[in-house]
Image (cartoon, helix red, strand yellow):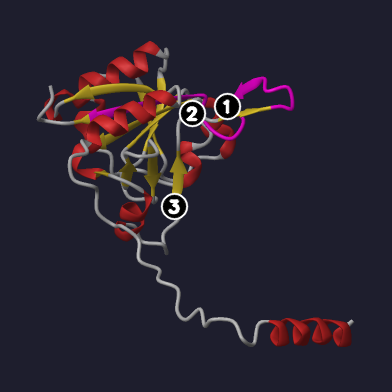
Amino acid sequence: MSDAREAILERIRVATADGPSVGSIPRTYRVATRPGIDVVERFVERVADYRATVARTTLDGIGLAVADALAQHHATRVVVPHGVPRPWLADAAVETLADDPPLSHAALDAVDAVVTGCAIAIAETGTIVLDAGPDQGRRVLSLLPDVHVCVVRAEQIVGDVPEALARLDARRPLTWISGPSATSDIELSRVEGVHGPRNLVVVVVDETRV
């Protein structure tokens, strides 16, 4: 097998000996949003395309927006990472559960919803990225509850994936979310909630548009 491999490679080397030198391949990617693109509007549009629910509010309105999202999904027991600001849940008539000590998978599966922040959001793909920061908690928190309410600030929204990668720490546990969990079988029958929450509510906080 080794002799055959070497013979094939030698034939390739001989055949390409007179060809042009390729040289180094440039690996430069755009890491800044193209001028003229409103990343917040693009993000809202893309997130809605994924069948997620989008609520837009100001900094002072986060509590009401989160409370409304939880009420619409009849969520009464909500797990909250320790870094989530208290005002986010101040208007919600719910029982909040801390993940300290860490809740079991069975306990997380029994709660109705989770409320988190995010590390960054991508306008072009409608993607939210979590990196297990204090307002996001462990990855499993965003996977087991049936409803995920995620608060995204306008300044966290970037244009595209290269721009997001330039800002993220690849050493952290990154979770990339594009809409509610969904898959389809060979007949294209859509099934939701297989790999994560069936319902995603994105609360976009933008002082300039509300």
Q: Is residue 65 above or below residue 123?
A: above
Residue pointed to by mark 2: 180
Report if residue 36 lies within the magenta region. Answer: no
User: Residue 166 at x, y = what percent?
Assistant: 31, 60
Please name whichever residue, 136 or 128, is drawn nearer the observer in this view of the structure. Answer: 128
Query: Is the residue under label 3 in contact with that under label 2 (CB below 8 Å)?
Result: no
State the residue at coordinates (57%, 26%).
193
Q: Give residue 174's mark.
A: 3
Residue pointed to by mark 1: 193
**From mark 3 to mark 1, how far is it between C-alphas?**
20 Å
The magenta segment is 185-204
**From mark 2 to mark 1, how far is it between C-alphas?**
7 Å
Report if residue 200 lies within the magenta region. Answer: yes
Disc 1 marks which amino acid? Gly
SS at badge 3: loop
Disc 3 marks which amino acid? Leu
SS at badge 2: loop
